[in-house]
Image (tube, rainbow, N blue to C red):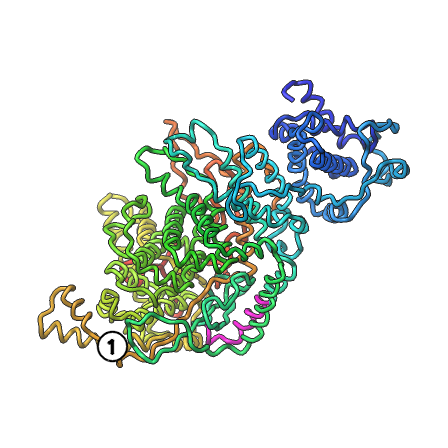
Amino acid sequence: MGATDSKLAFRKGVFRLFEERVKYRPSADDYWSCFWTLPETADEIYSLIGANDVRKTRDTAKENLETLLDKIILRIDTIVNAPHFPSTQHPPQHLLNCFRLLTRIMPYIFESPEHAEWEDAFFWTPRTVERIDAFGDDGGDESTPASASTDTPTDATAGTLDQKRIIEYDTLKLVLAVVYAIWEEGVGSSKSLGSSREMDMNRTEVLRTLTMLFSKSMYTSPSNTLAKEDLWLNYVIILVLLCSFMNTACKYDPLGWGVPYNHIMVADPAEQLVATCLRVLLILLDYRSPHAVELMHELDKHQHRQSLSTATEQLISDITTPSATESANITTTANDNSSLDENAQQSPSIDTNVGTTNNTNDAQEEPSLPAALLPTSPVSAEIQSILSSVEEINDTHDNPFKHYLSKLHRTQDFKFLMDGIQRILYNPLQASNTYLPRSTKRVQCNVEMMMLCWRLMECNQRFKNYLTETNHALDFMVVLIYFSVESKSNIAQVGVVRMCAFILQTLSSEREFGIKLNTTFTGHSSLPALARLPAFHGTYGDYLIISIVNLIASTHGGLSSLYPAFILTITNVSPYLKNLSVGSASKLITLFNSVSSAGFMLADDGNHRLTGYMLEVFNNIIQYHFANNPNVIYAVVRNHNRFEKLFKFTLSSGLAEIEHHRRLKEERQQSSTVQQANADGSQPADRQHEPNRRSSSASSFTPMYTLQKFTPTEEWVSLWFPQFPLETIQVLLNYLVPLVEEKCTLEGLTTDAQVLDFLRSVTMVGILPQRHGIFIRKFQWGEALVIWFRSMLWGQAYISSMHTSSSPWNGTLIKLFQIKHELPPPLNANGAVAASSPSASPPPPQQPSIPATAPIVSSSASTPPSSSSRSPAAPAAPTAATPTTTALSETSGHTPTSST
């Protein structure tokens, strides 16, 4: 349709859609066929059929829209079932144009809630539709004006249906009809069907249409996205698509022949196909039936009820991740780490507490799986009943894609999948670590591949076992840390960091992964500079601990809602860690000093949980690997004053400490202001805000939850402080501190190496209390996290579509997330980017990653609410009765008040 005349004819046909009533008659066939015969590219369809054109047809000439959809679907059915395809009568271009037309039209049907009832009736009610022969007789007038009576039946030829050839069909089944063949070799197939550049592009076109048909949830608000079943996800061929999508994605090698700059010389359509395959597969795996959603909602309600009745269990029965409404605490026990189905739609506030009992203090023995169950809360039986119902749903094919994914079991299949996943995930590390700048292309489907690996871990316990029993889990951990560090400073990519944190917590719940962390990290020097640690020589466990603490310390509160996931990752693996380095021990003490400060614990009603998690870290190391971790033991002994201060903590002492630090901060600010004013010869008032900015940037952590209206009370402190696991550390310090001091005094130990040698010779057998159980807190799903994941998935789809001129969702009324368009930065007189105004506020922290020129996708559901889901207010002047909002410092146990 390159000629101007054909484009003009096409536009006239578009005008007729909403200006006239085109009857469903043979004489109109030439008119309807122009929609798939004239266009040559998708760009032509998007440029010649405007958004207003579709909306006008939808609102003023609905019968024309119905006819057009019927004609398109019938044309697809004719071509697909043609005995000779492709042929002159049935060219592939017609089929592609039909898919492109559906992709262009359907979003405007989804966006209109007023047409939801019509959509259900048109697409989901069996109908009889006239099928006209190719050379039918002219039945009369071709069209009627758009002003014709609205009482006219939709089927204008209803009176002559008995004289025509009639078929009855299900609309969507024709749209989703596919050939039963697996595209690539891999899972379920030992040979490939073959591919070509044209075939890859055609497959991508069809998958874009499928993605659009599944996108109805984009036009539903986050609060309602799980309320109604999405019927568009019900009619899909299962096994063939599952294997084709997985094999296509995992077979792809972004490096190709490894020729530098090959991506600049030749475009690769396979990358678009891989990204689209991943996206469609993730959408299908994300489907949840109404019954499963109802059970998940019921579980959340029970958790909330439990949180109100068991406040004294808040320390152990904690919130690992935020729930959909209010925080909830419950304790679930299990015989082993896999007793709860990973597919269960459980709330994120459920902990799987795995307890072990052992009467010895032999630190050399590996922690074993539990021999007895821990006591459960009063309503645990009711919660377990709901969880059993969720497991039954999974077993009865609630989501067939997840069901078949859970049935994979062959080692060669797992190896094939992990090799493909690692090729994609390692690509950014390779692209940023080359001698020739930008010589290796960075693919854009890393986030989707990470999502797929997470889904595999959840759906298939055998895959997770394969992952954790091999070195793939260690490599995957390094990749997750790399993406977290890379995205930490970009507030638009906070969803990527959040997902990495949740996957790390999922990995940490596996015992084999904890043991694997003791492997020496020999490949650290080959990492990109972004992921390398200075002067690092240690194990993967050292790398994990140091990276997590650095990640928290360097973001200044930007990741405050992820503190529980990061710290619980360390807590889960702590019983298995051996030979931690001096750097790791120092980081653990730094983190403990920060979360145990009075200003942090009293700033909000949930912050004390982090203190309890860090106490568990030290308890696990002391009880299970005392002899193998002298650096940690020495760090605890050297910082015994901080632990002893926590032992004696009271509300009054905590408030006094906060007031003391507030006064010191004010004095430092005043002194610094005067000094700067004298040095610069300016008035002190001109600089009065700079110390605040410097102190804020100097602080390493900001509080996890801040609530200015929260006022701690003695009753509140008495609920959680007695639950702190302090006994093991108290016994250790009471025994070792005097012993070490005496040894240093009598024998003149003056170096750390001498003290460490002495600690290696000390045994705590018979001194430490009975070995406690190991509490493994698994990551669990809830309504809020399901909505967050879905909004992030569709946000990625929306952003990817913006790289092309034919984005099906651009300009439509999306409700699942908000769209914010970024303007290019202003240029100064020299043509350089001008500095931003100091009063400019940062973008909201609910945005998926995007290129600088694309619109920002901001979702109210993309960041799940924290355990304290209240919005922080402006900082108030601290008083002796109310704790200030403190930050977590890397150098001391307290920091100045954080600025909002």
884, above or below 472, in the image: below
809, above or below 27, in the image: below
Looking at the image, the residue that sits furthest to the front is 190
Please state the horizontal and vertical placement of residue 257, each as a whole percent of the image: 40, 33
State the residue in front, 94 or 587: 94
745, above or below 14, in the image: below
Please state the horizontal and vertical placement of residue 555, each as a whole percent of the image: 37, 52
Q: Main secondary structure of the magenta part?
A: helix
* Residue type marked 1: Met
State the residue in front, 507 or 189: 189
State the residue in front, 262 or 567: 262
State the residue in front, 882 or 752: 752
Residue visible at 55% across and 63% down in the picture: 344
529, above or below 514, in the image: above
**Is 238 in the magenta?**
no
Residue at disc 1, secondary structure: loop
**Is 304 in the magenta?**
yes
Please state the horizontal and vertical placement of residue 142, each as a whole percent of the image: 84, 27
Residue 306 in view, yes or no: yes
Which residue lies under the disc numbered 1? 764
Residue range highlighted in magenta: 299-314
Residue 727 sits in quarter: bottom left
